[in-house]
Image (cartoon, rainbow, N blue to C red):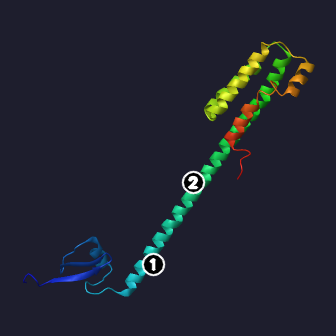
Amino acid sequence: MTQGEGHRAFLTPLGLVHGRRGRARSKTRAIWRLLNVGDEEMDVAYISALSALAGSVVGGFTSTLTTWMTQRAQSRTTHRAHEITRRQDLYRDFITAASKTYGDAIASSEPQLADLVALYSMISRMRVLSEPRTVSCADRVMGTIVDTYFSPNRSIRELRDLIKAGVGIDPLKEFSEAARDEVGIGRGA
């Protein structure tokens, strides 16, 4: 055999490959042998079958990927909704307990330690779950309640005057706004 003899080109799915007769050049050629495809020609039915198989694989992969992405997005949404609900419950409980304790502090100089400890417990839970702005507002509410216990008791008439003046009677306003911003209530869609 001279140098130019025996060389020929054969068709693979990856394109035209040049090589010597009888020598396996790649894994692709071994696949063609298993399929009994000759070196010189390839049956059109094999191309059609392989194309259908490749299309099925791509379609299956795409379907699986889409399902996975949808499940992941739903899981994130569910987790986020659960976290918001936990925060809403905590803020509701804090607002209720702080309002009751503040009302008690206005009318009495004797702090109820169990109520104060419960408020501190809720603030500690907020430190784990909430944004720093909300926690600092809760700390200020707590400070206001403690300071109110050590200030002179107020009469009903003094409370009415404070309400009319709009000062000093709503220590939870800033906290409520911070909590609302954090959980996203009242935002436009």
In x, y percent, where is residue 96? 79, 30
Closest to the observer, 10 or 98: 98
Please tell me which residue is depicted at 67% across the width and 32% down the height of the picture.
134
Question: Few, some or many C-alpha atoms within 10 Å of disc 1 (few <14, some 14-19, many ≥20)?
Answer: few
In the rendered view, does 23 fall on the left or right side of 71?
Answer: left
**Amino acid of disc 2:** Arg
In x, y percent, where is residue 185? 73, 44
Residue placed farthest to the right in the image? 157
- Residue labelled with disc 2: 72
- Residue labelled with disc 1: 52
| Separation of marks 2 and 1 at Cα, in angstroms | 30 Å
Q: Is residue 141 visible?
A: yes
Closest to the observer, 165 or 114: 165
Closer to the observer: label 2 or label 1? 2
Q: Are discs 2 and 1 less than 8 Å apart at CB?
A: no
Closest to the observer, 69 or 172: 172
Which quadrant of the figure contains the N terminus?
Answer: bottom left
